[in-house]
C-alpha cells in the first residue's frame, strides 16, 4: 500500500512538473509603454481697471504669474489702485502657499486686499478650481518723499501650486 501511495505521489509530481514546463514553453512576456497626462497647474492674472489721479498714468502688463506695473508722472501722497483677479487656467486646482512677492524701488507701501464687495478667504487659504478666480485690489501709496513727476516700476508675483502639496 505504501508503495502504491509513493508511486501515485511521484506520478503526480512528475505530471505537475510536465504541466509547468509545458506552460512555460507557451508563455511570453508582454511589454507596454505609454504616457499618462494627469493635468496642468497654471494660473493667470486679469486686470480690470486702474484708478489714478488724472495727471498720472498707470501701465500694466502680465507675463505668466507676474503683474508688471509702471506709474508715469507720479505724485507723492497719492494712492494708485489696480483691480485684478487671479484665476486657475490649468486643469488641476491650485492654492497659494505664500504671499505675493513685490519688487520695487520706491518710497511708499503696497497692499493687496480682496476686491470691495467680494468677501473671500485670504488668498493663501484659497483653493481655485479650474476656471475659478480670486478678485483683489492692489493699492500703491507713494510716500511724501516720492519724486513728483517721476516714473516708478513694480512687479507683483504670486505662485500657485497643486492644492494638495
Image: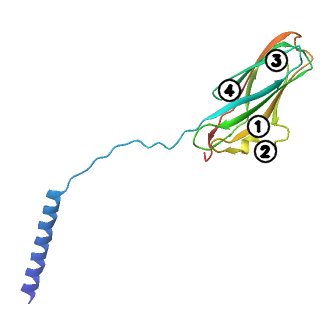
| Mark found first going from the N terminus, 1 or 4 | 4
Circles 1 and 4, Cβ within 8 Å, touching? The answer is no
Which of the two residues, 115 or 109, is positioned nearer the viewer here?
Answer: 115
Give the quadrant of residue 98. Answer: top right
- Locate residue 144, reporting x and y percent: 93, 17
- Locate residue 57, reporting x and y percent: 82, 15
Circles 4 and 3, Cβ within 8 Å, touching? The answer is no
Q: Secondary structure at mark 1?
A: strand
Which of the two residues, 127 or 132, is positioned nearer the viewer here?
Answer: 132
Mark 3 Cα-neighbour bin, 10 Å: few <14, some 14–19, many ≥20: some
Mark 2 Cα-neighbour bin, 10 Å: few <14, some 14–19, many ≥20: few
| Mark found first going from the N terminus, 4 or 3 | 4
| Mark found first going from the N terminus, 4 or 2 | 4
Q: Give the residue number, with chain letter if any, for mark 3.
A: 106
Mark 2 or 3, closer to the camera:
2
Mark 4 Cα-neighbour bin, 10 Å: few <14, some 14–19, many ≥20: some
Label drawn at residue 135: 1
| Mark found first going from the N terminus, 2 or 3 | 3
Q: On screen, 11 above or below 24? A: below
Quadrant of the frame with the N terminus: bottom left
| Mark found first going from the N terminus, 2 or 1 | 2
Q: On screen, 120 above or below 12? A: above
Circles 2 and 1, Cβ within 8 Å, touching? The answer is yes
Quadrant of the frame with the C terminus: top right
Q: Give the residue number, with chain letter if any, for mark 4.
A: 66
Label drawn at residue 120: 2
Q: Secondary structure at mark 3?
A: loop
Q: On screen, 39 above or below 158? A: below
- Please name the residue shown 73% across and 35% down the image: 99
In the displayed structure image, the side of residue 80 where residue 19 appears, left or right: left
Amino acid at each position: 500500500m505504501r508503495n502504491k501511495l509513493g508511486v501515485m505521489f511521484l506520478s503526480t509530481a512528475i505530471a505537475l512538473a510536465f504541466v509547468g514546463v509545458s506552460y512555460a514553453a507557451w508563455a511570453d512576456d508582454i511589454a507596454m509603454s505609454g504616457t499618462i497626462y494627469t493635468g496642468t497647474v497654471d494660473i493667470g492674472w486679469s486686470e480690470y481697471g486702474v484708478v489714478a489721479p488724472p495727471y498720472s498714468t498707470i501701465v500694466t502688463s502680465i507675463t505668466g504669474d507676474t503683474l508688471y506695473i509702471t506709474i508715469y508722472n507720479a505724485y507723492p501722497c497719492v494712492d494708485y489702485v489696480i483691480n485684478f483677479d487671479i484665476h486657475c487656467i490649468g486643469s488641476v486646482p491650485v492654492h497659494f502657499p505664500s504671499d505675493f512677492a513685490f519688487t520695487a524701488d520706491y518710497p511708499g507701501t503696497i497692499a493687496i486686499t480682496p476686491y470691495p464687495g467680494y468677501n473671500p478667504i485670504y488668498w493663501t487659504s484659497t483653493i481655485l478650481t479650474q476656471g475659478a478666480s480670486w478678485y483683489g485690489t492692489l493699492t500703491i501709496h507713494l510716500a511724501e518723499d516720492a519724486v513728483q513727476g517721476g516714473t516708478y516700476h513694480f512687479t507683483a508675483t504670486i505662485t500657485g501650486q497643486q492644492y494638495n502639496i
